[in-house]
Amino acid sequence: MKNNKRTIRNISVGFIAFMCSILLVGLTLILIMERTIMSADFLNKAAVKSDYYTALTKQVTVQIQDIGLGSGIPQDVLEEVVDVKQVQRDFESYSYQAYMGNALTIEQAPFLEQISGLIYDYGATKGQKLTPENVQGVKLFSEKSYDVYSDFINLPYLPAVGQRIQAFASNLVLLQVILGVSVLLMLMLIVYLLHGWWHRLLRYMAYIFSGSGLMLIVLPAAILWSGIIKRVSIASPPLYKLITTYLSSSLMVLIYVGGAFLLVSLIFAGISTILRKHQSSVKMW
């Protein structure tokens, strides 16, 4: 009879531990998603890590220089048409607004003034007189350059993604509370069923964290190992590097957290072993 009760208790505790591990993974995934793929800060950190701002600055500069050559403006005149800090500032402003589901238009007037100033300075060094036709040409060139710069800064899909994120975020807190309370209740139930057998309790805690850790590690590691992220079809090299870095970094966060869970499980397992040996030695005496 005692053996039957013990078997039923072990099966019950094992099932509860398994469900607790699943819920813990779900809660962890939501928390990590909130701080990675749902965060403009994480995107901007990926941009710094991938050297996106430098590459984008070069790409914008070359594009505007090519337009300038068609208008008779030498390349060296437009070498400093934009700088890395300006690109980073505008992209970060855009990304923060986009993740809120809003479209951000880069201020046009300062950019037009910046472009036209370079051209007017070049004309002054050449002793060229300003005519209404020249002024109109500089204006048209500056506006076209602005359109190029704005197109490079603005990622067309990001505001739509931001709108979906905001729609999902409204229910995110409630889902976190539900999962958190569920995990806590199941842990309390395991403690209730195993009170007095502390080494067994810690052993099941090790099972919970090891199972959660493995689930958090295996799938992201398989995705990274498969190279599917590197096969993303994006024509722009800077944008390709940004997106692949952004996705890979998100998966690496899951792997790091999974590794931390495995470390916690080893600590629980070690303490459980020590308590079991201590309990056995006490019974012998």
Image: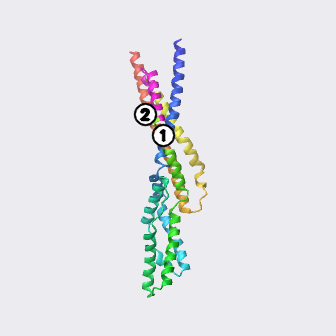
Q: Amino acid at mark 1?
A: Thr
**Disc number placed over residue 267 in the picture, else none:** 2
| Magenta stretch holds residue 98 | no
Which x, y percent locates residue 76?
Answer: 47, 78
Q: Quadrant of the C terminus?
A: top left
In the image, which is nearer the foreground, mark 2 or mark 1? 1
Q: Which residue is mark 1?
A: 28
* SS at circle 1: helix
**Viewer can see residue 26:** yes
Which x, y percent locates residue 255?
Answer: 50, 44
Q: Amino acid at mark 2?
A: Ile
Q: Nearer the viewer, residue 81 or 280?
A: 81
Q: Nearer the viewer, residue 274 or 160?
A: 160
| Label located before the other in sequence (2 or 1) | 1
The overriding secondary structure of the stretch rendered in magenta is helix
* SS at circle 2: helix
